[in-house]
Image (cartoon, rainbow, N blue to C red):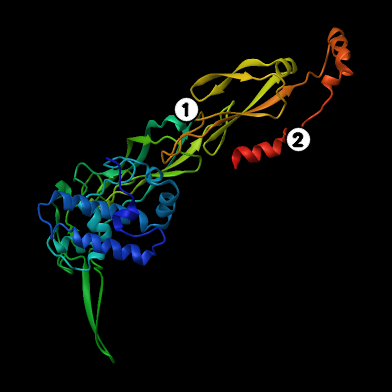
Amino acid sequence: MSKRDYYEVLEVDKNATESDIKKAYRKMALKYHPDKNPDDKKAEDMFKEAAEAYEVLSDPDKKARYDRYGHAGMGGASGSGGFGGGMSMDDIFSQFGDIFGGAFGGFGGQSQRGRRVNKGSNLRVKVRLNLQEVANGVEKKIKVSKYVSCKNCRGTGADSGTSYSTCNTCHGSGHVTRVTNTFLGQMQTTSTCPSCGGEGRSITKPCNNCHGNGVVKEDDIITLNIPAGVAEGMQLSVNGKGNAGARGGIPGDLIVLIEEEKNPDLERDGNNLLHNLFISFSDAALGAQVDVPTIDGKARLKIAPGTQSGKILRLKGKGLPSVNGYGNGDLLININVWIPKELSKEEKNILEKFRDSANFKPNPTQSEKSYFDKMKDFFS
């Protein structure tokens, strides 16, 4: 099932302001909140869908990529380990819990959501693709060195995962409230607990493996499903595949930067491909059939008699697919008539016979446009 447009999910248009997007998300989140819709799988899915849409549209960089490339710019597939999506309830409440403004108090425990949740940092990797991989999409397995959750303490940072206690300062809430008297009356301020750093608990015996951090450095193999039609410089985001968050926090994302290998025969221009074809004077004058390179191999091309140098032939649909799935570009063949620099005596004698022939004198018609005019027609 294809994903709905994020703007459609939040019921806003593309010109919506940051404030409009936040209000729209809060409306959807409150409507489908699990506390309001207990044991309703459809409402839970809508709740997650709204959170995913807000996670993208509330971030200027992600929003710009989405506006340009759609879901494919976020990577195209949802679910754990895929590009985009895959947000759990813990992810949603830890990242966007302030959106609800205390309207609900049951799901997962209010005190749990009040604690500071550590978020792991993002990782950046570069992936080089050849033209065939760009055209068809590809599954790549890459090895990255990153922080992962400590198996010994299950990511808690505490020995055996149990050697911690509730913070005596904030009593597990992760924040402290202070009331001060001012000339305007009493003023109440809330800040992160200085004793536990907002985590709501303190480790009594740190894990020997991770030394209380809850994460350790390891190599990890990550599978990337890269969609067809990506371009040089495009960034794709893999949710939750960055560094693990300390002491049970949520992981960061893996940012994949696309690089393209240069093809010796085909040059990319958007979704179109360009090829410079050199033919002999004889083939140009008499006509011929030649093989030209394409993404999938060779294609037979007919050269009509009297073909001029600079003529551009089009092989429709033989270019690259659109990253948004809106069809393929074309393969444009630029004809170059090859003139030999050195001639044998016999070749010179043959050509001398035609030098004064009226048929061999240049006589272009008005219908034969210049090279630049042709290029304008093809790319307009």
Residue 119 seen in the figure: no
**Whether residue 218 is situated above or below residue 175 in the rendered picture:** above
- How many numbered discs sit on the rendered protein? 2
Residue 102 lies, in percent from the top left, at 19, 68
Frontmost residue, 233 versus 1: 1
Describe the element under mark 1 as helix, strand or loop. helix
Tell me the quarter of the image containing the C terminus: top right
Q: Look at 29% across and 63% down and name the residue there.
A: 24
Residue that protrudes farthest toward the top in the picture: 346
Q: Residue at the left extreme?
A: 39
Q: Quadrant of the N terminus?
A: top left
- Badge 2: few (under 14), some or many (20 or more) residues near its Cα, within 10 Å? few
SS of the residue at dot 2?
loop
The amino acid sitting under disc 2 is Gln
Q: Nearer the viewer, residue 278 or 303?
A: 303
Q: Is residue 359 visible?
A: yes
Q: Mark 2 and 1 residues: CB-CB less than 8 Å, in contact?
A: no
Identify the amino acid type marked 1: Gln
Residue at (66, 20) in percent of width and height = 304
What residue does disc 1 label?
132
Residue 19 in the image: state x and y as whole percent.
35, 67
Residue 104 position, x and y percent, is 15, 65
What label sits on residue 32 in the rendered view? none
Mark nearer the N terminus (2 vs 1): 1
Q: Quadrant of residue 82?
A: top left
Q: Badge 2 is on which residue?
A: 366
User: Quadrant location of residue 115?
Assistant: bottom left
Who's the residue at 19% across and 42% down the image? 152
- Where residue 93 appears, x then y in whole percent? 22, 58
Q: Gap between marks 2 and 1, in whole Å?
A: 40 Å
